[in-house]
């Protein structure tokens, strides 16, 4: 059993005072911690004083990093060793698992290695030449942040008494320094957030409806930055009427259910903008000591660029990358819009034209897929010449396309299909092969199946599937009849 330390309490207190002053007064808290560890090391005569920062607590391992160290001589220095950089310690050893759980619970440890039972933990400490060790957890805002420790490679001693007391007090100083650093960082982040995100901060007192706004939000709403009070009703009138109803409903739900936080994207009239701009309102309900709602506070964040990016991304996701036509997702949206518009004039209908290139596989086999891709692009341009701006052109896959048109009569639908067929087969497609200088002249034809596309009330998805099935039957009949022709579903 190791002997107890004979540390001088007054020396430890003096070291703590000097170290604490360094932590409080240095420009960066980490420099102060370095000086504090040096004071602890010199006062205790330890081989090294160190701090491990907890990075991740996994079910079967603890991930840490060796972030601070003072060593009495270069021989005891371990900070530069690779094995202590972002290292994971397995919890398979029951003794080490218990040690970790006790540190998480805030317990200190005084360890004499020669007195330990044989096992992985003792072997690990002996590999570092440690004879005795003391550790104290560092807790920040109630959570285990890391561990402060003393290693002695020359003495097998107990650190109970002034040594462990000094370590506990140092741990509290370090935790305070980390906490102050967090507060300072948050303050700077908020200032930067205001500049970069152009956000505004607001608060409403529920008792009297009084509103407080940050300077940025006042300016955005058209008030001087020094305006003393912004009326709640005037502020709300800046929100689009539809979004205002949604916001009121959301806030009422929060207050009724005890929900503390909510957020909503709204369109906001901003000074200097010709049309409403998208902003995100983030709100949190504050409560008094009795748990009663006291106020609502939050942010107004400009998300107009994000909304624009989302719209561009949505549009891109609905287009075929090769031809620029709609894809199946875009087709579904197009049909939903047609379905929402409802009825059509008497004697007219919407139609689906299902188009397939005849013998396209042979062209790909003979000339290669790059040539086939160019042909699909040229084909798409020719078809568009026969369509109206509101008609939908869809690439369903491979060489199969769908054309969504209406409202029109049966005769007009057949005439459109025939114009498309003739536009494709009327003249050969010219393709220049830049790598060889050869110009290809390729003739194409298409077969087309025509079917009525219902848009009356009902399931638009089922109607789409039904129309595709009808058009596919007509297309199959057109190909069976010799290709380069049109067939209409239900017409013999």
Image: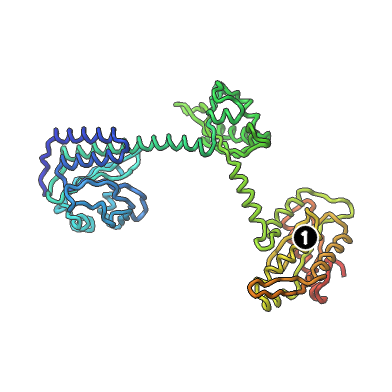
* Image-quadrant location for residue 34: top left
Q: Judge by depth and name the residue closer to the eye, 83 or 468.
A: 83
- Pick the front one: 186 or 232: 186
Picture residue at 68% right of the left edge, 36% below the top: 274
Mark 1 lies on residue: 384
Please state the horizontal and vertical placement of residue 61, each as a whole percent of the image.
33, 55
Q: Is residue 233 visible?
A: yes
Helix, strand or loop for disc 1:
helix
Instruction: Identify the residue at horizontal 69%, vertical 56% (top origin).
Output: 330
Q: How many numbered marks, from 0 up?
A: 1
Up the image or down, 313 lies above or below 402; here it is above
The 10 Å Cα crowd at callout 1, few under 14, some 14 to 19, many 20 or more, is some
Q: In the picture provided, is 179 more to the left or to the right than 289?
A: left
Is residue 411 depicted above or below 65 in this figure?
below
Task: Kindly tell me whether residue 242 is visible in this rendering.
Answer: no
Q: Position of residue 131 (x, y in %)?
A: 15, 51
Q: Compare residues 363 and 464 and report the one nearer the observer.
A: 363
Q: Residue at x 77, y 64 (%)?
A: 382
Residue 165 appears left or right of 342: left
In the displayed structure, 256 sits above or below 405; it is: above
**Image quadrant in which you'd find residue 460:** bottom right
- Seen as rendered, the residue at the extreme front is 437
Q: Position of residue 110 (x, y in %)?
A: 19, 45
Q: How is the image coloured?
A: rainbow
Q: Quadrant of the C terminus?
A: bottom right
Q: Position of residue 198 (x, y in %)?
A: 54, 36
Image quarter for residue 255?
top right
Residue at 59 percent across and 44 percent down: it is 305
Relative to 359, 4 lies left or right: left
């Amino acid at each position: 059993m190791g002997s107890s330390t004979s540390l001088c309490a007054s020396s430890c207190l003096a070291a703590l005072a000097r170290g604490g002053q360094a932590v409080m007064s240095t420009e960066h808290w980490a420099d102060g911690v370095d000086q504090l560890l040096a004071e602890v090391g010199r006062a205790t005569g330890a081989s090294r004083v160190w701090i491990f920062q907890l990075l991740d607590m996994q079910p079967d391992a603890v991930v840490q990093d060796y972030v601070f160290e003072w060593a009495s001589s270069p021989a005891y220095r371990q900070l530069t060793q690779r094995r202590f950089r972002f290292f994971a310690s397995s919890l398979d050893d029951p003794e080490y698992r218990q040690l970790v759980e006790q540190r998480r619970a805030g317990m200190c440890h005084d360890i004499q290695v020669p007195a330990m039972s044989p096992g992985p933990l003792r072997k690990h400490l002996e590999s570092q030449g440690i004879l005795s060790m003391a550790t104290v957890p560092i807790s920040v805002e109630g959570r285990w942040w890391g561990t402060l420790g003393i290693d002695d490679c020359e003495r097998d001693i107990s650190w109970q008494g002034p040594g462990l007391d000094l370590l506990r007090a140092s741990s509290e100083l370090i935790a305070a320094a980390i906490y102050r650093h967090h507060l300072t960082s948050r303050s700077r982040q908020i200032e930067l957030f205001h500049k970069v995100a152009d956000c505004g901060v607001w608060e409403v007192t529920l008792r009297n409806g009084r509103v407080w706004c940050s300077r940025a939000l006042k300016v955005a709403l058209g008030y001087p930055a020094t305006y003393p009070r912004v009326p709640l009703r005037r502020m709300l009138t800046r929100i689009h009427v539809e979004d205002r109803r949604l916001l009121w409903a959301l806030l009422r739900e929060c207050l009724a259910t005890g929900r503390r936080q909510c957020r909503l994207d709204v369109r906001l009239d901003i000074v200097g903008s010709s049309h409403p701009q998208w902003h995100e309102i983030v709100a949190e309900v504050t409560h008094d000591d009795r748990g009663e709602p006291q106020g609502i506070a939050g942010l107004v964040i400009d998300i107009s660029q994000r909304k624009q990016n989302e719209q561009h991304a949505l549009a891109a996701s609905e287009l075929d990358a090769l031809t620029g036509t709609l894809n199946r997702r875009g087709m579904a949206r197009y049909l939903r819009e047609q379905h929402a518009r409802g009825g059509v004039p008497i004697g007219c209908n919407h139609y689906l034209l299902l188009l397939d290139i005849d013998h396209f596989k042979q062209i790909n086999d003979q000339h290669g897929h790059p040539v086939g891709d160019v042909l699909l692009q040229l084909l798409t341009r020719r078809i568009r010449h026969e369509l109206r701006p509101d008609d939908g052109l869809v690439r369903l896959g491979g060489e199969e396309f769908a054309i969504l048109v209406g409202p029109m009569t049966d005769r007009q639908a057949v005439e459109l299909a025939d114009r498309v067929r003739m536009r494709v087969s009327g003249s050969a497609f010219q393709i220049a092969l830049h790598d060889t200088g050869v110009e290809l002249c390729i003739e194409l034809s298409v077969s087309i199946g025509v079917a009525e596309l219902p848009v009356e009330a009902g399931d638009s998805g089922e109607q789409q599937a039904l129309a595709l099935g009808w058009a596919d039957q007509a297309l199959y009949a057109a190909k069976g009849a010799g290709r380069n022709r049109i067939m209409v579903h239900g017409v013999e």
